[in-house]
Amino acid sequence: VPEGPEVETVRRTLHPSVVNRRIVKATATGRRSVRRYGEGPVALAAFESDVTGLNITGTQRRGKYLWMTTDRGALVVHLRMSGQVLVCAPTDPGVVHTHIMLDLDDGAQVRFVDPRTFGEMWRTDDPIAELAHVGPDAVEGAADEAWFVDRLRTRRSPVKSVLLDQGFVSGIGNIYSDEICHRSGIRPTRLANTITKPKARLIAANTIDILNEAIALGGSSLRDGQYVDAHGVAGEASANHRVYDQLKAGCGTCGGPIKRQVIGGRSSYFCVACQK
Ligand SMILES: [Zn+2]
């Protein structure tokens, strides 16, 4: 599942291909991907006419939401479980599970591919208003240390669940919440309101570091092969994982055994020795 660093990598690799380009033709074939436009075939045509002719001026991201700014609002992409945004040539072979194709005025084609169909794309006049329920991007939120520490320490939930709450800060998912807890030496089950201020400051600092390190490595591509950047290239950040999915390898810090535990319905990994 793409988290903030993966979506940011998609944004960075997509940006040069779309900025200052015009969408000359849109082709939607996947109804689920354009479900904001209604149900049935009418949604496909409504999406196509809504985005054809848009002039793309830039790209932005908050948490797991990516959008292209245009001369008529923003074209939002939410990758959810398995979405991919790929820059292709129209002559490139078709990829299974392609639901949307955007032909640009320079001949490039942006494809939205999504095997599990939870992802979606839509145009909105005001992405900031539409994403008002989404907290600040996690790197920005953690940079406001006092705010982050205070908010974190008021919550009577496992710290992992708080980090995953997109209404608190956005962009942290299952992988990076485990890695942030590990580097901070804290169990993911620890109730956030029992964390000391110095420890909460450490969590803020590690949130910034871990997400930025993952962005620098192009995000985490897992064995399922579903996350790739806009050119179809896998990221290398999985090599940095010290606890996430490391049951066989052991803790990347001390070599000790990794424990897996379900927290709030999510599989979580931590080191019994390193994390208290
Ligand atoms: Zn350890």
Image: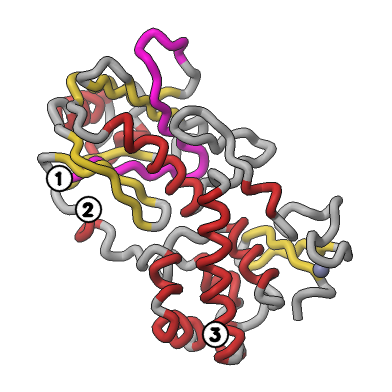
Residue at label 3?
Answer: 156
Residue 25: % across, % down: 20, 19
Above or below, 271 relative to 233: below
Please name whichever residue, 106 or 134, is drawn nearer the observer in this view of the structure.
106
Disc 1 to disc 2, how far (Cα)? 8 Å
Quarter occupied by residue 170:
bottom left
Q: Residue at x 58, y 35 (%)?
A: 234
Please name whichever residue, 88 or 78, is drawn nearer the observer in this view of the structure.
88
Sequence-wise first label, 3 or 1: 1
Point out which mark residue 127 bears.
2
Residue 275: % across, % down: 75, 76
- Of discs 2 and 3, which sits in the foreground? 2
Sequence-wise first label, 2 or 3: 2
Q: Residue at x 44, y 65 (%)?
A: 139
Q: Residue at x 36, y 39 (%)?
A: 120
Residue 134: % across, % down: 34, 63
Point out which mark residue 33 bears.
none
Q: Is the residue under label 2 in contact with that under label 1 (CB below 8 Å)?
A: yes
Q: Regarding mark 1 in the picture, which secondary structure is present there?
A: strand
Disc 2 to disc 3, how far (Cα)? 31 Å
Residue at label 1?
Answer: 73
Q: Residue at x 69, y 78 (%)?
A: 186
